[in-house]
Amino acid sequence: MSRLITRRGLLGATAAGLALSGLMPAWARSGSPGLGPAMPLLSGNEFRLRVGHSPFSLKGRTGHAITLNGVLPAPLIRLREGQRVRIHVENGLDEDTSIHWHGLLVPFEMDGVPGVSFPGIPAGATFTYDFSVIQSGTYWYHSHSGLQEQMGHYGPMIIDPDGADPVEYDREHVLVLSDWSFMHPHEIFTRLKQKGGFFNRQKQTIAGRLRDAGGMTQQDRAMFAGMRMDPTDIADVTGAAYDYLINGHGQVDRWTGLFSPGERVRLRIINAAAQTIFNFRIPGLPLTVVAADGQNVRPVTVDEFQIGNAETYDIIVQPDTDQAFSVVAESIDRSGMAVATLAPRMGMSAPVPMLRERPLLGMKDMGMDHGAHGGAHAHAASGEAKAGHDEMDMRDESKVAFDPGVGVDMISPNPVDRTGEPGIGLEDVGHRVLTYRDLVSLAPRADRRVPSRNIEIHLTGNMERFMWSIDGEKLSERPEPYRLARNERVRLTLINDTMMTHPMHLHGHFFEIVNGHGAHQPFKHTVMVLPGGKVSLDLTADAPGDWAFHCHMLYHMHAGMMRVVTVRPLDGGAA
Ligand SMILES: [Cu+2]
């Protein structure tokens, strides 16, 4: 404890009070009044972060965490648009570490990806990140070394706008969603390599499939069996291995955010999970989305949204009654959930909904388009949509420009744009669910050029062998980088040739999701590509350097689902 006090004392925080709360940063402690001037955080032009080992306790059990300044999640960093910041990161581990500032537009040498943009921070060394802050919004930061992120190496970052904030609010909270396991991440990875579906305890047995009256047709079942796939393979690490956290708290030791009835409360929601996509809702409260990935959007009100790894949403809720509400972040496969409480006072609680019925994958997730009402999912599949499955080639090599090896078990025969869909399992939940097509940028973009070319990029894998790649090649095979000319306007079309949702992240840039909103296409740093689907992204390659482009599922990235995007020349203007 004395070490914690000393360290925090150096940071200028109110040391004694904090030390008693152990591993939680003050903003994440159970019972937060919200972010305010008195809340300890890291801000200003210069501060330190120390990466180290800490114990982490949950449900009476203690595990081993990798933390920054001794807390999980890591300290809240709050900066202001237009400022410059120097952040000294000291590596107290006995292995390399790094920090990547997720969504921040920084010179590539400050981006923090070992082997791509800098060498990493060796054990015992200190690296100073030094950059100007040229944007505002809700972001986060995390390790880009090995599997450290899974063990707690992640934290939130807020950048206040230089001018007026278009979003009005009376109070704000940060909600960091994450997944925690007492199993070491290397062991999780080993198990996944042994069998892709290792953690799927929801597998349908053959008997169960036959009994499942609302389930799949005979042909659907044959398709899945033929491809050695399981329609319940929605997530590869599940509640069997995970506890799901909000601000470092599990379901039992629940985090509470306070409000006064009638206030406009801004919630800054960050999915910092290693391998979990969440469905987020607050039963009883409409959610007005005002920003996505830190970028302001026209307010849109929904009842639920799916949030992929590394995405952030800012929402406004306005509870006007003297009651508590449950904040629910359900894992996409519904094997578990994180729960927090919004309440006027401490000690209040609200009912927590049951986990909903698990979703099943269907033919559309295999990249088969059945038209507008073709029974996209096994739930809804009916006899009408089955003709022709048997003849469908699920691995037609003529559809791709690369040589698909053993690492590619499927090539989507007919991938469709799924940006108008709410995400796996949310098609029929009976209330409003956000889709990417609902996102409209508040400000129009400056670059009105039409993309001069389209780069087609296939997200590929072999689910059973837990092999993941891009265009059939793993990063370790040293594939050619994608080369963009500086200031080029280009379209990337991502095609998902797998049956999992991949949250794809490009460093150093915001791309726009091509969603029909013209100059107001939403800016994003991370986009979920639905199974068997495709999405087009427009991009102005205005950041020279070498940038990581990868799936933000930690174990997919670790398995090789990552590439380098090179923007040249480094000096001068247009190429
Ligand atoms: Cu992935």
Image: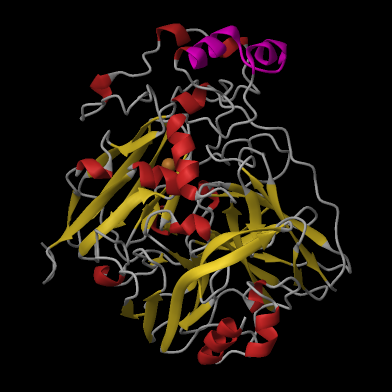
Toward which corner of the image does residue 32 lie, by quadrant?
bottom right
| Residue visible at 65% across and 22% down in the picture | 380
How far from the left and from the top, in percent, is residue 501? Answer: 48, 39
Q: Residue at 55% of width from left, 88% of height from top?
A: 6
**Lateral position of residue 21 relative to residue 320, left or right:** left
Looking at the picture, how far across and down is residue 462, in whole percent? 38, 28
In this view, 212 is above or below 34: above
Q: Quadrant of the N terminus?
A: bottom right
Label count reads 0
* Quarter occupied by residue 464: top left
**Residue 37 is at least partly visible in this image:** no
Does residue 330 lie above or below 486 as drawn? above
**Which portion, as a residue range, is magenta?**
205-225
| Viewport quadrant of the C terminus | bottom left
- Choose between 57 and 550: the one closer to the eye: 57
Left or right: where 156 falls relative to 486: right
Would residue 311 be found to the left or right of residue 351 on screen?
left
